[in-house]
Image (tube, helix red, strand yellow):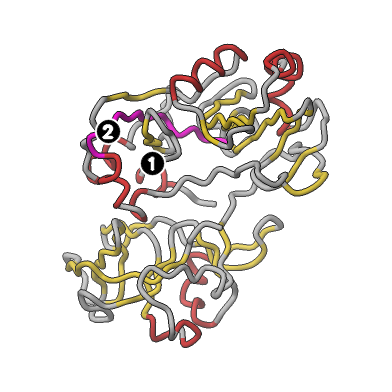
Amino acid sequence: MRALVTIQRVRGIQAIPGSDFLEAAHIMGWTCVVKKGEFQEGDLGVYFEVDSFLPLDPRYEFLRNSSYRENEDNGKGFRIRTARMRGQLSQGLFLPLAQFPELSDAAEGDDVTGKLGVKKWYIPETSGAGGTIIGERPFGIPASDEIRIQSALELLDELRGKPYYITTKMDGTSGIVYFIDGKIGCCSRNKEIKDEAEALYWSPVYRYGLKEKLAAYGKNIVLTGEICGPGIQKNKLRLSSREWYVFDVKDWDSGGYVPYDRALEICASLGVPFVPLEERGEAFAYTLEELLEKARGKYPSGLDKEGIVVRDVRSPKAVSFKVLNNDALLKEKD
């Protein structure tokens, strides 16, 4: 489970020009707007990441006007999202540790997501043709959920000086295709889907003829990519038909993810597209601020892109993180 809620320390406090009641607190690589005087540098607090979905609780009622959501996919609660307050970008929610007596024994860095009953917010699909669920995602087949760099600044140092590549983060829904011991299957992020030609999550198989191609390939493999197109999210790419952009290739027998160049070769042999490459280099040297600027930009459609993903060329999962486009986050309404 992704660590959506953690105990974190205030790295610094910054005034917000023109505001008598609010100021900016720096937590890890994030900036959160907080009540003036509520925190001092060095204080511990409870940090809720963007896309946390908080349960109904009197402690969160102050969020009702701006953050209350209710739908079949997520239930009832409060969605934390990127916002701008008094001109200051705020990403996440930071509350005093004293408000949570159930966390009295928690220490800095502890994951308290489960203790507070917080879930990840999933944007409901606008397409109703996802497919028929026949079970949970099979054990061992990974779900994709890249960590945001602001929550893991140490990854910048881990990647520094190493060969890297940067790809465009496509806007769609994650779709998994696996071929294991002669069986082909498809999954959404969390569920296995019945083989039906009209099912959204089987569209990569039928679109690219993968039943025949994977059988001919003959090796146990798991491909994970982003399904994009009409009826999926807001189709920011303005595609006329569904496309699938692979970003992970896992060798099932070894249990490891194949290097970038080998992943490209495999996808080319299968006739499936890989996520677009934006940059490749021999020695990573970007700062957080530079990556946030690089994450801005547009898709070919002219609409704001979702962001970028940065990885090690030789071992994509050794160091891997996403950098989201703040321009796009601020425009989200759902």
Query: Mark 2 to mark 1: distance in Å?
Result: 10 Å
Q: Between 232 and 44, which is closer to the camera in this rendering? A: 44
Left or right: residue 91 versus residue 88 is right
Compared with 263, 134 (above or below) is below
- Residue 227 percent across, percent down from the top left: 61, 31
Under circle 2, the secondary element is loop
Vertical comparison of 22 with 143: above or below: below
Residue at image point 38% right, 41% down:
319
Graded by Cα atoms within 10 Å as few (under 14), some (14 to 19) or many (20 or more), the crowding at tag 2 reads some
Tell me the residue at 51%/22% (across/down): 263
Q: How many other residues sit within 10 Å of disc 1, few (<14), some (14-19) or many (≥20)? A: some
Rendered image: mark on residue 319: 1
Going by the numbered disc 2, the residue's amino acid type is: Lys
Q: Position of residue 307 (x, y in %)?
A: 40, 37
Above or below — where is 119 with respect to 286?
A: below
Label 1: which secondary element: loop
**In this picture, is 2 found above or below 196?**
below
Is residue 207 shown left or right of residue 240?
A: right
Residue 232 shown in magenta: no
The part of the image, by quadrant, that contains residue 277 is top left
Q: Is residue 171 magenta?
A: yes
Left or right: residue 175 compared with residue 334: right
Magenta-colored span: 160-172
Q: Amino acid at mark 1?
A: Val
Q: Identify the mark nearer the N-term, 2 or 1.
A: 2
Residue 318 position in % (x across, y down): 41, 40
Q: Are marks 2 and 1 in contact (CB under 8 Å)?
A: yes
Q: Which residue was labeled with disc 2?
A: 162
Q: Residue 240: horizontal and vertical position, in percent?
A: 61, 20
Viewer-proximal residue among 27 and 234: 27
